[in-house]
Image (cartoon, rainbow, N blue to C red):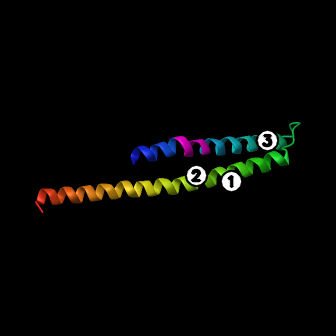
Amino acid sequence: MDEEINRIFDEKIGFHFLIVIFFIALTLFEWYRWFLKISVNPNTYSTVLATLIVAYSIRKIYILKKCIRRLQMARNGERIVGESLEFLREKGS
């Protein structure tokens, strides 16, 4: 279970976090250049695209967090059952 949780976090959630950070930084940089009157205007399309991609990634992160939470509950349930069985085995029942 722990391996599956780590795999989901490393392979899927980490990727979406990077996407979110990249596009937020890109959008902030474009607006920064616009506010300082540096000869580039933030394109509305780039802001909309960044917003859509960030929203998609946040949604995926939320879904994957639910999956990880279920796996953690399964792992904890297995531990409880194992401890109960070990207790019964030691008790001799």
Q: Residue at x 79, y 41 (%)?
A: 30
Amino acid at the residue labelled 1: Ala
Instruction: Please report the residue visible at 74 percent of the width from the left and 47 percent of the height from the top.
Output: 50
- Where does the image place residue 22, in percent across and percent down from the top left? 68, 40
C-alpha separation, residue under disc 1 versus residue under disc 2:
10 Å
Inspect the image, locate mark 2, and give the three-letter code of the amino acid beneath it: Ile
Question: Along the horizontal axis of the image, is 90 left or right of 31?
Answer: left
Closer to the chain start, of discs 3 and 1, is: 3
Pointer 2 residue? 61
Q: Residue furthest front?
A: 93
Residue placed under numbered mark 1 in the picture: 55
Quote the CA–CA distance across marks 2 and 3.
25 Å
| Amino acid under disc 3 | Glu
The picture places residue 23, in percent across and down from the top left corner, at 70, 43
Residues drawn in magenta: 11-16
- Among numbered discs 2 and 3, the one appearing first in the sequence: 3
Q: Secondary structure at mark 1?
A: helix
Q: Residues within 10 Å of mark 3 (few under 14, many from 20)?
A: some
In the rendered image of this protein, does residue 93 appear above or below residue 18? below
Q: Would you identify the image quadrant in which residue 3 lies?
A: top left
Residue 26 in the image: x percent, y percent? 73, 40
Q: Which residue is mark 3?
A: 30
**Tag 3 secondary structure:** helix
Q: Which dot, 3 or 1, sits closer to the camera?
A: 1
Q: Residues within 10 Å of mark 1 (few under 14, many from 20)?
A: few
Q: Secondary structure at mark 2?
A: helix
Q: Is residue 57 left or right of residue 84?
A: right
Q: Is residue 58 left or right of residue 1?
A: right
For label 2, the crowd category at 10 Å Cα-Cα, with few meaning under 14, some 14 to 19 and many 20 or more, is some
Point out residue 33 in the picture as x, y percentages from the top left corner.
81, 39
Badge 1 or badge 2: first in the primary sequence: 1
